[in-house]
Image (cartoon, grey):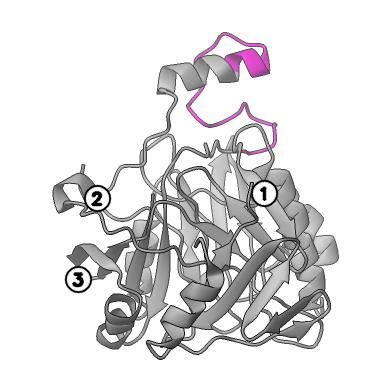
Amino acid sequence: MVQDVEAAVADLRGKGVTFEEYDLPGVKTVNGIAELGGTRGAWFKDPEGNILSVVQLPAA
Amino acid sequence: MADLRLQDAREPRATLQRRLSCGWRGTAHSLSFHRLVGGRDLAVRAADCGVEAPGSFATSAQCATHGRRVVPLATSEDARRGSASGASGIAPLARASAQRTLADRWWRSPVSRNRVQLCGGGVFWTAGPATFLRTAGVGEPAPTIQAPIGRTLTPVRSPRQHREEENVRDGTTRRAPMGVRKEGAQMVMPMPAEWSFGTTIPAKDLDGTRRFYEDVLGAQVVMEDPGGIIYRSGDSSSASTPPSSPGRPSTPWAPSWSRMSRRRWPISEARA
């Protein structure tokens, strides 16, 4: 989990990480980031294809 | 705190089985877990239960009884229930729904006390200071969620406390094996949220993948052994399902990445 998903995404993109884009019912990424009920997440793959993500939970 | 274990996906199956051996017998690649309870072999087949897609695998944690790893997320009851909805051709979204249902039931159970956040197509679990996760897609090897080797995952409750609580729950005073309810009851292992969990990420190219985790993500090596590398994985983590929908390949459990803590974590602590 991260405090600022946009910053995390930008940081990782700067290191060459490519984020997945999804356009599904209820889940649509914009610039690699999806918002789900206040939670924001972005998914990317490691070189083996394992999907990882960075997630920013809503502020309590 | 959670740990991330990068493991050679080519590790012999026999080794995987040894890793999973204790009260639970797990065959990671055949996607099944068994436990002998009262002479009955209660099988939990992740592939059948509709909880996870074929190729994925039931989650695991520390065995409370033997201090080793492996606790299936799904119980035999879950497997039976899931089988009805887990017929061939089940849509990934339906599987996701089944995942949410099971995850909700399991993680909200008294023994887990985990907080669950359900968000659209995904499930986010927050398990106190740590979490777990697991990922595997169709056709992928079935890695395990397991405690890092050499690390003891200690429940907050002592065995005696746990036994006493179980006796109160069961209305008995006998000594029951820790973590195992009496025969005939639904098989449930305690999974306190206070435990630390580890995640295993399979890698065929261990050297190349470790460069990604270390150079790109900044993961700190905790320890290494011939079978893999254990990384520190931040102060907390969560599990989530990436989006899925009918017609798309299922992407079951995927780990979420936690920011690396900069605090050094000595190997001696990892082996404690």
Amino acid of disc 2? Gly
Q: Is residue A22 visible?
A: yes
Distance from label 1 to label 3 (Cα)? 35 Å
Q: Which of disc 3 and disc 1 is earlier in sequence?
A: 1
Q: Secondary structure at mark 1?
A: strand
In this rendering, position of residue B177 left or right of residue B5: right
Q: Which residue lies under the disc numbered 2? A: B150
Q: Position of residue B125 (x, y in %)?
A: 61, 53
Distance from label 3 to label 2 (Cα)? 13 Å
Q: Which residue lies under the disc numbered 3? A: B226
At horizontal 43% and vertical 17% (from top left) the residue drawn is B160
Task: Compare residues B262 and B55 and report the one nearer the observer.
Answer: B262
Q: What crowding class fits label 1: few (fewer than 14 Cα within 10 Å), some (14-19), or many (20 or more)? A: many
Q: Which chain does tag 2 point to?
A: B
Residues behind callouts 1 and 3 on a single chain: yes
Q: Position of residue B15 (x, y in %)?
A: 32, 66
Task: Compare residues B24 and A25 and report the one nearer the observer.
Answer: A25
